[in-house]
Amino acid sequence: MAEQQQVTIPVITKKDEMRAFSRKQKLAGKTVAFVPTMGYLHEGHLSLIEAAKSHADVVVASIYVNPTQFSANEDFDVYPRNPDSDRLQLQAAGCAAVFEPEGSLYHQVPGAGDGSNVVGRESGHPDSHETWVTVERLQQGLCGVSRPHFFRGVATVVTKLFHIVEPDVAVFGQKDYQQWRLITRMVRDLDFPISIIGMPICRENDGLAMSSRNARLSPESRANALSISQAMAWAQQAVAQRQATSAAAIAAEVRQRITAAGGEVDYVQLRDADNLHEVADAAAQATLLAVAAWFPAKDRGTVRLIDNMVLGQLPS
Ligand SMILES: Nc1ncnc2c1ncn2[C@@H]1O[C@H](COP(=O)(O)OP(=O)(O)OP(=O)(O)O)[C@@H](O)[C@H]1O
Ligand SMILES: CC(C)(CO)[C@@H](O)C(=O)[O-]
Ligand code: BAL
């Protein structure tokens, strides 16, 4: 019989214990890197842990499916979860501790329902959580259109996590490109003493961007979702060879290819890769080609996938 692996990594569930753990490392002269996640880990997450190890002495990861970044009609309830496997993966990757908050990270009023602050499910209690961090311009557009509560929830929970973990460095994936730029801007604007590192997208062998949500795709959708990376690869080549550089024309072609493969496109947009301003000519600067599209899920509903490629040079 195969021997079961034991979880030996410290699993910290309380905010004050997490803060004490980090402070203890710092008192011992060590630097702390932090990798926030929503769990159901894959190699993309593990690449962030690897990067974190190269930037600090000690790495802490968090697993928390943050309710406030989901609207009521989104996939909070069916978001994939597997904490046992996550803990073992983090342990094997060399993480020093994992923060898995017990219950809600948000202030809860006894007797005020689940107090989860999921938009659309708020208890409405006057003493529940009411403080939000918004990055005014960068939270608009792209994912901010179909997920209007998303970036407010992300900026707020990342702020809370930064106050709890007190890292020197935090690592984010460029798959969530707008999120990475927004957190970089938030840290600059609000003087967090934290360096933000953005790491490249890890892909499956056939090019699909790794994502926890891929687990919810039907086999047919899994095959059809390849149209996203394939259409982006077409765009990258078209710009490199100057066959097409008009942002509008490239967006239209990418949209058409994904739609033809059965995807419902949320957006296809070309933006300045640094500040996400709109661009007209993809060859005039480092240009982000960003895509979001829905494909049918294997159970019910749809799965929203995001992906992107930079046409040209990445911002620092
Ligand atoms: N394929 C990937 N390559 C690099 N980083 C990634 C990849 N997928 C996710 N990340 C990063 O991991 C961190 C945690 O993301 P999260 O836990 O939401 O995983 P996810 O796979 O992006 O989930 P989903 O796509 O279902 O939202 C984020 O900084 C995210 O950008
Ligand atoms: C940064 C994050 C952990 C905040 O909940 C989440 O948005 C994610 O996993 O990318
Ligand atoms: N990876 C970003 C988390 C989310 O989509 O809610």
Image: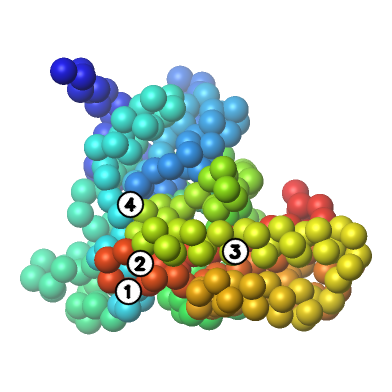
Identity of the amino acid at label 1?
Answer: Gly
Q: Which quadrant holds residue 107?
A: bottom left
Identity of the amino acid at label 3?
Answer: Ile
Residue ID for mark 1: 301
CB at disc 3 and ligand 1 closer than 8 Å: no
Residue placed most toward the observer, 141 or 5: 5
Residue 203, image x, y percentages: 57, 46
**From the viewer's perspective, is the residue at label 3 or at label 4 nearer?**
3
Residue ID for mark 3: 228
In 3D space, how far apart are the residues under numbered discs 2 and 3 (Cα atoms)?
16 Å
Mark 2 touches mark 1? (CB < 8 Å): yes
Identity of the amino acid at label 2?
Answer: Ala
Q: Is residue 43 above or below residue 108?
A: above
Residue ID for mark 2: 297
| Numbered disc 1: secondary structure | loop
Identity of the amino acid at label 4?
Answer: Tyr
Task: Specify few, some or many for label 4: CA neighbours under 10 Å numbering under 14, 14-19, or 20 or more.
Answer: many
Considering only order in the chain, which callout, 3 or 1, is on the residue closer to the N terminus? Answer: 3
Task: Report if residue 296 is visible in the image.
Answer: yes
CB at disc 4 and ligand 2 closer than 8 Å: yes
Residue 291, image x, y percentages: 60, 68
Q: Which mark is residue 64?
A: 4
Single out the residue that lies furthest toward the left: 111
| Numbered disc 2: secondary structure | loop
Left or right, 188 with reference to 152: right
Q: Residue at x 24, y 26 (%)?
A: 7
Residue placed most toward the observer, 22 or 154: 154
Considering only order in the chain, which callout, 1 or 4, is on the residue closer to the N terminus? Answer: 4
Task: Specify few, some or many for label 2: CA neighbours under 10 Å numbering under 14, 14-19, or 20 or more.
Answer: many
